[in-house]
Image: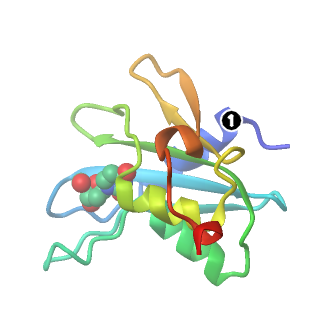
Amino acid sequence: MMSDRELIDLAIEARNNAYTPYSDFKVGAALLSKEGKVYKGCNIENAAYTPTNCAERTAFFKAVSEGATDFKAIAIVGGYDKDGLKFCPPCGVCRQVMMEFCESDKFRILLLDEDDEIKSYLLKDILPFGFGPKNL
Ligand code: THU
């Protein structure tokens, strides 16, 4: 069984591969599937800027492309190397991608606060009234 701290540590590991020549802001994510597999992701920037992919979506798209579609939790860490890790909540686009694949009253988002404590949020609380597959 994967602990919250272990999943955060995997996100920290994933952050090392962040490709961020434009912002220097490095993000790592570790997505835990219901089968117990972990998919890691980092942000990947681009010279044309808008094709940049967030760490969270990298993790989701890796997982879905490997056949996983049911998820329990995602750990996310981010910050500039010069400042260390900062509280790094997922962007709105990534929340919407979570909404596509996750039960919003069960899926947990694990974030590190400034004191290195793990905070756990439910998707429904950080994306209230979200539009998902059930709304179609
Ligand atoms: N970024 C993420 O990867 N995830 C987030 O939740 C917030 C933002 C990335 C995008 C960009 O490469 C850099 O952080 C600065 O916005």
From the top left corner, tell me how far across and down residue 30 is, in percent: 58, 53
Residue 6 location, quadrant: top right
Q: Is residue 69 left or right of residue 47?
A: right
Mark 1 sits on what residue? 4
Residue at image point 65% right, 44% down: 7
Displayed-image quarter of ligand 1: bottom left
34 left or right of 131 in image: right
Quarter holding the C terminus is bottom right
Q: Is residue 106 rendered to the left or right of residue 57?
A: right
For disc 1, does the CB lie below 8 Å from ligand 1? Answer: no
Quarter of the figure with the N terminus: top right
Query: Which residue appears at 73% of the width and 81% of the height?
Result: 67
Amino acid tagged 1: Asp
* Residue 28: percent from left, percent from top: 45, 52
What kind of element bears circle 1?
Answer: helix
Question: Image height check: is 110 above or below 52?
Answer: above
Near mark 1 (Cα within 10 A), the count class, few <14, some 14-19 or many ≥20, is: some
Locate residue 37: give its quadrant: bottom right
Residue 94's quadrant in the figure? bottom left
